[in-house]
Amino acid sequence: VIAAAWLAVLALSVQEKSLATLPEKASGVVVNAEATAVAWIEGGRSVVFKGIKGAEFEAVRSLTINREGTAVAYAAKDRGSWSVVSGSWKSEGYDEVGAPVLEGTGLAFAARKGAAWVVVFDGAAGPEFDRVDYLTVSADGDHAAYAGRRGKKSSLVIGDQRGPEFDDVRHVTFAAEDRLAYAAMLDKKWWIVEGTVTPETPAIAVLKDPATGKTGCQVGLFDVTDPERLKSFVKAWLEGDEVPSLEVDPDVPWKDVTDILGRCKAAGCARVRFGILGSREIFETFDSIQALAPLPDRKFAACIGTQGGPLRVFQGGRQSQEFRAIEGLVAGPKGLLAYRATEEEGWFVVRGRAFGQKVKLYKAIDGPVLSADGTRIAFAAMDGTSWRIVAGETHSGAYDQIWLPRFNADNTALVFAARKGREILRIDLPLK
Amino acid sequence: MIASLLLALLCQTDATAPDRAAEFARRLEKAVAEGELITLDMAMNADAFYDRVVGATKLSPGLVGFLKPMIRTSFTSEPYFAIAKGRATWKFLRIRKADDGLRALFRLTGQGGAYSYHDLLLAPDGDRFQISDYYVLNFAGFQSDLVRRSLIPSPQTLDVLNQLLRPTAGDFMMDYGSNPLNQFSQLVTAGEYRKALDKYDENVGVLKNVAIAQVMRINAARSIDQKAHANAVQQMSDVFKNDPAVDMAALGGYLEFGALEKALGTIDRIEKAVGSDVFLNILRANAYMGDKQSAKARDLYRSVTEAEPTLDQGWWGLINVHLAAKEFKDVARCLDAVEKNLNVTLGDLAQIDAYKDFVASPEYAAWMKGRGPK
């Protein structure tokens, strides 16, 4: 009985465990999402990971750690040029490198030589651009996606494949391993483009560009007007015993379709199917889009943006009440949304569209985060001097710094990392 | 001098166009036989077909957006060969000059003895040709006519649909479902032959001038009885005098009711319309088989296998004759030829009742031994 009572008490009590004690010259501290590993930059010249100090460089910055806490990556300056370092691997030297992105074993970073930017993913450099932005890596580490800009046009880039050209592309965001969304802008109107990295069907959409009158081809998210790009998709489908299907815009002259058939034939295709082109009309447009959150189980991604008025959260034709500022938008199952917002002063967390909802104000908020089933919400809140975790009725103790928490598998506790002085702690916080 | 040179040049162009068209048709036939249907798709001009379907009918942009994809997609290889159901054989027969241009006659045969003759309408495209439509001899009409009758709404409905910004399938189905030809066709397809004939009679004024309706009516009547069939054939003949479509439609009934002379007469008339075609010997052989004249049937099937060994119906007909006559050595020889010429691998014949005696014969054992393990 005593043992059982003790276990019950233990289950209801906060457990703190020290992960590391930071030295005086520590900066850029990172803790993985599981709150099991810590790394930091020491003296601005080397990285300490799992208590082991790495090589010294002229300068080190942009330290990042993967979700599992098994690897770190950072930018390091050596003999005047910048590289990205991860474990024993070091990239070639560049004039400049961006912050590395590390998911699982997938490592990507933007790098510049002269005027040309490239994205290096898993050690291989991609095509050259004038600029690269919004670099992201899928949770399984298999795909790196970003917005590549040449001249006045931008497009989504994944590996060797590119999306159609727009005036601007932003907020490239993976939803699940293979699905992503991004914001595209043409003629000052923004909208959300969504799709899968691996096209769901072997369908080639044959479209007429209303601006240029030219015929173009798309496969899922990608522009395959270039015959070689089309060929690479067709060949892959044929290897998988799939028959390509052409879905033709009624405005496209059949002569152009015949040309595309010729390209398919040149790729080894003996027969095609013809399907009816699904509606490619843009669902809704925006004057601005500030952030995206693709939904795990719904078609339309949510976004923070404006539609000829104040800032709101939009999703699938519905919109939240207006706020002065909105940040930290996250999406859960069944269309659940959460974000932090402010009106006059102080920040609060909003769940859903929040019309008429009374909320508590904090000086600053980080998060929110949702449980996997979307039933629980938690965030880090600052009262002016210290940070604590808030999850419904549950409040953690006060800390100098907090990393965003995650819910355990059965939603009975939150796990997070926090700093108290020089001590980095892992905290298990039981939920009421 | 210049005029005579120009004339000579024109004559030369005219003289070579059918040759070039024949070469084009042979290339298409070869590509399709090799499974390269994309070559046929590249030759089919779906825009020209769409223009022929729509003609002078005024369609709003919304209607164009709805109808054009369907009409253009219907003029591609997949729906073209779908009517053959299963393994199709597509044979180029001849080129002829018609008022509307050159036409390439093809014979399409498929599963269950299905056959049709298509005159592909060829339009010059540089030094090549494009197919802009095809005339279906079995239905005495262009495919574009058939699609127009089936898809283009009635003038009254068109007035309403042209007002809609974005018509939906539901808007169309109202009109599609009230079209007498579609109603009649659906009843025939559903096997409701008596109801179908009643529907035809209700709308005889509209349907009697539509060849495909008359063809479907003959097929439906055949399922009722011989008298109904004869009556339907006569009524189609009254409207479509001497058209091969009447004979093609009537033949099935004649074979079914054992009217040998009538069957042979219709086949001769079909031959006059399409020209010499060895496939017609299969129809003749089928007629003789129905009349239990298997020796004549065997000779005719054999003539087909010799002239066109890739035509499967010849081999299966011949095998059938040999099985009935218990000529098992010939059965084995034909089965080998089937595998060689039709590029098929035979399954387990022991599972097929028609081969029961053959499977029990020493010829089968010897044949199987010669085949070795598969």
Image (cartoon, grey):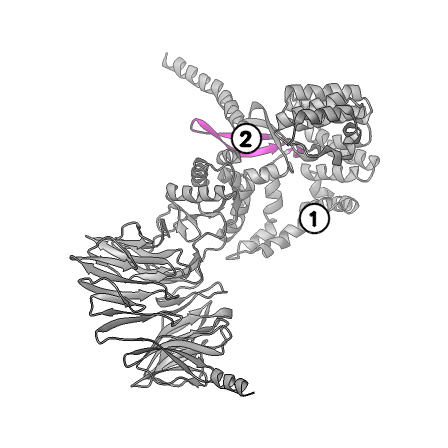
Residue B126 on the magenta segment: yes
Residues in magenta?
B119-140
Specify the subunit that label 1 lies on.
B
Question: What's the residue type where badge 2 is placed?
Answer: Glu
Q: Chain of mark 2?
A: B
Vertical placement of residue B121 versus A156, above or below: above
Q: Amino acid at mark 1?
A: Gln
Residue at image point 41% right, 53% down: A221
**Residue B100 visible within the image:** no
First in sequence, mark 2 or 1: give its number. 2
Quarter holding residue A37:
bottom left
Residue at left 23%, top 70%?
A42
Check residue B183 in the rendering and tell me which mark sits there, or answer none: 1
Which residue is located at x 74 percent, y 18 percent? B299
Q: CA separation, marks 2 and 1?
A: 38 Å
Count of number-bearing discs: 2
